[in-house]
Amino acid sequence: MSAGVEVRLREEAERWRKRLETEMEGLSGEDEFVENIEAYYADSKHFEERGMLVESFEALVWAWSWLEIGRRLGTVEG
């Protein structure tokens, strides 16, 4: 991966991670949804610490997916 792509991927992941952190404040709802959101968020941080940037970003996408689907179904609030 080129240095430019790596920098951009890190920046995008950080931007979306911060937004997710804000969205997760006061999050409540069906345990399965909340647990998956939190797990994918944690996975993202884990992967980034190990330099696995694509996997880190993918985990963020999954966390956001669980959050958005949960909200649309009415099983997640916050």
Image (spheres, rainbow, N blue to C red):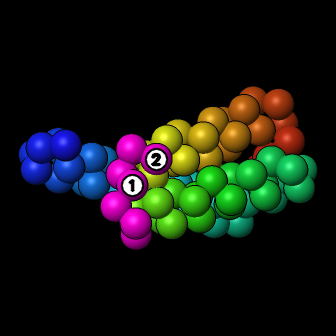
| Residue 76 coordinates in the image, percent (x, y) | 79, 46
SS of the residue under disc 2:
helix
**Label disc, if present, on residue 55 of the rendered structure:** 2
| Residue 37 coordinates in the image, percent (x, y) | 69, 52
Question: Is residue 17 visible in the rendered structure shown here?
Answer: no
Residue type (three-letter) at the residue carrying disc 1: Met
The local crowd at label 1, few if under 14, some if 14 to 19, many if 20 or more residues have their Cα within 10 Å, is few
Q: Nearer the viewer, residue 68 or 50?
A: 50
SS of the residue under disc 1:
loop
Q: CB atoms at circles 2 and 1 under 8 Å apart? A: yes
Residue underneath mark 1: 52
Where 14 falls versus 33 (above or below)?
Answer: below
* Residue 56 as seen in the image, left or right of residue 34: left
- Range drawn in magenta: 49-55
The residue under the point 51% across, 47% down is 60
- State how far apart marks 2 and 1 are (Cα): 6 Å
Q: Nearer the viewer, residue 3 or 76?
A: 3
